[in-house]
Amino acid sequence: MNRIVGLETEYGCLVHSDDRQGGPDAHPIRVKNHLFRVARMGAIDLHYRDYEEPPGNGGFLLNGGRLYLDMGHLEVSTPECLTLRDVVAYDRAGDFLLQRALAEMELAGKVSFVKNNIDHHTGATFGCHENYLMKRGAQFTPQVLAALLSFLATRQIFTGAGRVGQANPLAFEFEPHRHEQRVLFQISQRADHIVNDIYQWVQFNRAIINARDEPLADYRKYRRLHLLIGDSNMNEFTTALKVGTTAMVLDLLEEGIIPKRVGLLDPVQSTRDISRDQSYRWIARLENGQTRSAFEIQRSFLALAQNYLAGMDAEYDWVLREWAAVLDGLERDVMSQANKVDWIAKKWLLQTFVDEEKIGWDDPWLQSLDLEYHNLNPAQGLYHALVGEGRAERLISDQRIEFCTTTPPANTRAQARGLAVQHLQSLNTNYVINWDSIRIGDKDPLIMGNPFHPYGAEIRQLLADAPPAS
C-alpha cells in the first residue's frame, strides 16, 4: 500500500452459563486485567486519557497496538500498518489475544467474544472503525466527498458481514412512515445504524465518515480519515479487499482523479437500500436523478485504479485482480463468492440450516446462529468451521498471527511503541504512552509526528536514559 492504515474493533461478549463473577459487563474487565497484569501483554495506562478513560482502563500492547474498555466493550486497535498483509495479520492478532486470554482464564467454555456489530435485542451497535492516513494538502471538495461516499456506500456488496433482520434507529423515527418490505437478511450489519453522511460525534449520530480532525501525527502534514461505516469481518480476504480497495480509492481522490456520475442523491439512504435489497441488483439513485447499480459504480473506481495504479506494487496488483474477480463473480452468481465474502458465507450457512430444519427466516434460532458466525472460539465459531472445511480463503498463517501479538511492524512508528512497552514492564517509573508520543519519567517526551518513521534509535536512546529497574 501507499499509506498508513489501522483498524479498531469493538467486541461483543456472550456468557453461556450462570457465572457468579459477573455477566457480559464484568468479563471484558477481567480479560483486560488478565492481559495486562497476568499475561503481561502490554503497559497499562497510568494517567487519564479523557474523562471516559481513567487510569487502568487500558493500555498499549507489545505489538504497538492498543486494548481498552470503551462503553462496556473491549476494543482492540491494530498498530499502524503500511502493508495490507500487516493490516490483516494484526487485526487477527487482536482476535487471538482475546481468545487465548479466555482459555488461560479457563473461561472459554463459558464466555465468548464475538467480532460482530449488533446484539439483535437492544438495537445496540458497536463498531469496526477504519483509519487511513491522508495528506493534509488533500482537498475534500464536494466532488471528492461525493465520490468517496458513493464508493463507501456501494463497497458493502463485498465487505458486508451480513445480518439477520433489521433495525430502525431512533434518528429515523421522525421521518414519515414508509411501508417497507420486512427484511429477513441483509448484507451489512452497520447499514441500518448509519444516520449521517459526515458528522463529528460518534456515539449518538453515527456517520459514514467521522469528521473529527484528530490526525494523531504532525497536523501540518497529515490528516486521519476515520470511517464508521464498515462491518467487522471474520474472513481475511474480506478484510484485505475492504482495506485495499479503499486505500486505492484514496490514492485516486488525493490526486483529483474522480469517476464521473457516481455522486449519490442520498448516501445514507442508498447504504440502507443496498444492504436490504433482496434482489441483489443494488440500484442507487444519483444526485443527477439517474440510477446506477453498485456494480457500475464500483467498476468506475476499478477502471481508474487499473489505469493509474497498476504496477505500483505487488499488493495493489493483487487488489486489482481480486476486486475485478469478485465483482465478476457477484454479478454472475452471488453464492460463488462464499469463500471470500463474509455475508455470502453466512447466508449460505443460514440457508442450509433453514432447509435442513424446515424453519422460516423469521425463526429466532437464526439470530443465535448469526452471532455464532462471529464467535472467536475455533471450537464454536461457525466461521472457523468453514475454515476447517476449506470453505473460507485464508491469507495469513496461524503462526504469523501469533507472532504479531507480541511483535510490532518494523516499518512504522509502532516499532518504537512496542519497544517502549517491552522495556517499561521492567522499569519502576512513571510513563505516558500515546499514539504520537512517549514520555518516561521526567525526561523530555519523544514526539513521533511521522507515522512512517520507526523511531528505533530515538526510543532506544530514551530508554537508555530511563531510571534503572527496581
Image (cartoon, rainbow, N blue to C red):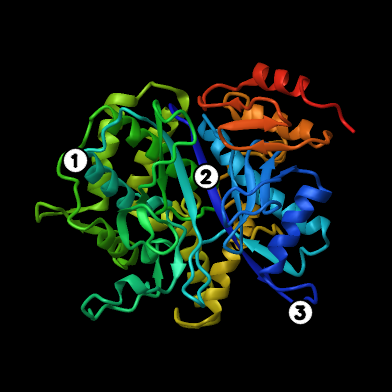
Q: Give the amino acid at mark 2.
A: Leu
Counting residues from the start of the chain, the first of labels 3 and 2 encountered is 2
Judging from the image, what secondary structure is the residue with disc 1 in? Answer: helix
Judging from the image, what secondary structure is the residue with disc 2 in? Answer: strand
Left or right placement of residue 311 versus residue 357 in this view:
left
Residue under the point 65% across and 18% down? 458
Q: Residues within 10 Å of mark 2 (few under 14, many from 20)?
A: many
Residue under the point 31% across and 27% down? 137
Per the model, the C-alpha gap separating discs 3 and 2 is 33 Å
Q: Is mark 3 in CB contact (under 8 Å) with mark 2?
A: no
Instruction: Indicate the position of residue 286 as horizontal and vertical percent values.
Output: 15, 53
Q: Residue furthest right?
A: 470
Q: Residues within 10 Å of mark 3 (few under 14, many from 20)?
A: few
Instruction: Indicate the position of residue 140 as horizontal and vertical percent values.
Output: 26, 38
Q: How many marks?
A: 3
Of 14 and 446, nearer the camera is 446
> Which residue corresponds to mark 2?
7
